[in-house]
Image (tube, rainbow, N blue to C red):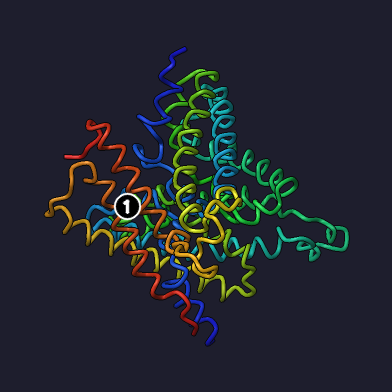
Amino acid sequence: MQELVSLFVKSIFVDNMVFAYFLGMCSYLAVSKNVKTAIGLGVAVIFVLGVTLPVNYLLNKYVLTPAALSWLGPDFAGLDLSFLSFIIFIAVIASIVQLVEMVVEKYSPALYASLGIFLPLIAVNCAILGGSLFMQERGYETLAEATTFALGSGIGWFLAIVALAAIREKLSYSQVPAPLRGLGITFIVVGLMGIAFMSFMGIKL
Amino acid sequence: MDKKIFIEPLFKNNPVSVLVLGICSALAVTVKLEPALVMALSVTIVLGFSEVIISLLRNTIPNRIRIIVQLVVVAMLVILVDQFLKAFAYDVSKQLSVFVGLIITNCIIMGRIEAFALGNKPLPAFVDGIANGLGYGIILVVVAFFREFFGSGTILGYPIIPAEWYIKNGGFYENNGLFILPPMALILVGAFIWVQRSIQKELQEK
C-alpha cells in the first residue's frame, strides 16, 4: 500500500508528464487559453488514461510479452509478440476513446456536453500512448500499480494544464514584446513552471 | 511541381515553430545531438512514406474511418523504424526510449496527412512529408546543439571546450547543468520563436 501511495505522488509531481517528459504538449499548448476548457480537457485525460492503461497492462501481460501466451497451451510458449505493441496499444486507445464517447453520450449528456469535443482529440494525445509505453518500459508488476500510475500521471497533467491556463489568462493583461506574444511567451512560461516543478526532483517517499 | 512545397516548411512555415505541431518529441530527445539527429531522420522517413501511402489510398478510404486507417499506416511504419533501430543502433534506441513509439501520435504526422496527403497526388505528398520532416529536424538540431554544447561541452560526443578550462583542472569554466534538464528545451524553443518572429513580422500575434 505504501509503495502505491509513493508511486502515486511520484507520478503526479516528480515524473510529471508535462514537465519531465513533455508528453501531450500539442493539446497542452493549444487548449490552455482559459481555465474552464483546460479543466474539461484535464478531466478527460485523467479519465481516458485511467481506463486505457489498465487494459493495455493486461494485454501486455497476457498477450504481448515474450512467452505471455503460454496460458493458451505449451505450443504458444515460444511466441514473442512484443513488436506488435505499438499497433495494439494505439488500436486499444482509439477504440476505447470511441466507446467511452458513446457511453458518456448515452448515460450522461451533461458530462458529454462538457467533455464531448475533447474526447476524440485525446485519442492522438501522446500522454495517453506515452503512459502505456512507460508502463511497458518500466515493467509495472501488478494491475494496482499500473492503475495508480495512470491516475497519478493523469492528475499531474490536469494540474499542469490548469496552472498554465490560469497564468495565460492573467498574461493577456501584460505588455509582452511583440515577437514573443502568444506562442513564444507560453513556451518560456512553461519552461519556468518546469524549473519550479524541478524542486520536487529527488524527493524519496 | 511547386518549389514552395519543399522550401516553405523549412523555415517560413516550419511545423514546430509556426504550426505548433510535434512539440513533445522535439523537446524530449534534444539533450544530445546524436539522438536528435536519429529522431529527425526517423520522423522524416515515417512522414514521407505515410504521406505517400495515404495519398495513394486517398480515394478509397471512407471518410468516417480515415483516422483509424491513418493510425494503422503510421503505426506500421513506426514499427519498422523501431525494429530497424533496435537491430542496428541499439544504444540510440535505448536513449530515445518511448519516443520512437510516440512518433505514431506525433501531431506533425497526423496534421500533414490530414492537411496535405488527403488532397494531393503521391509525389507532392512525398515532397511535403520530407520537407516537413526536415523542418522539424532543423528545430531539433538547433535546440540539441545548444543543449549539448552548453550542458556537456561536447558536440556529437566530441569535447569542444578544452579540458584545462574546467574548474576541476584549475581553469575558470563549468558546464551549465540547467541545459541538460527538461525546462531549458522549452525556453530554447521559446527563444527560437522569438528570433523567427522578429525576422518574419507577419507571424506576430496581435
The image shows residue B75 at horizontal and vertical percentages of 60, 42
Q: Number of labelled discs?
A: 1
Helix, strand, or loop for circle 1? helix
At x 45% / y 49%, what residue is drawn? B146
Q: Tell me which amino acid carries mark 1.
A: Phe
Q: Nearer the viewer, residue B84 or B75?
A: B84
At x 38% / y 59%, what residue is drawn? A44
Question: Splitting the image into 4 quarters, where does residue A9 fall?
Answer: bottom left
Residue A61 relative to residue B179: left or right? right
The residue labelled by disc 1 is A187
Point out the residue furthest to the top here.
B1
- Chain containing the residue with disc 1: A
Is residue A129 visible to us here? no
Residue A33 relative to residue B72: left or right? left
Question: Against A29, is B204 above or below?
Answer: above
The image shows residue A126 at horizontal and vertical percentages of 48, 52
The image shows residue B37 at horizontal and vertical percentages of 57, 42
Is residue A190 visible to us here? yes
At x 42% / y 63%, what residue is drawn? B178
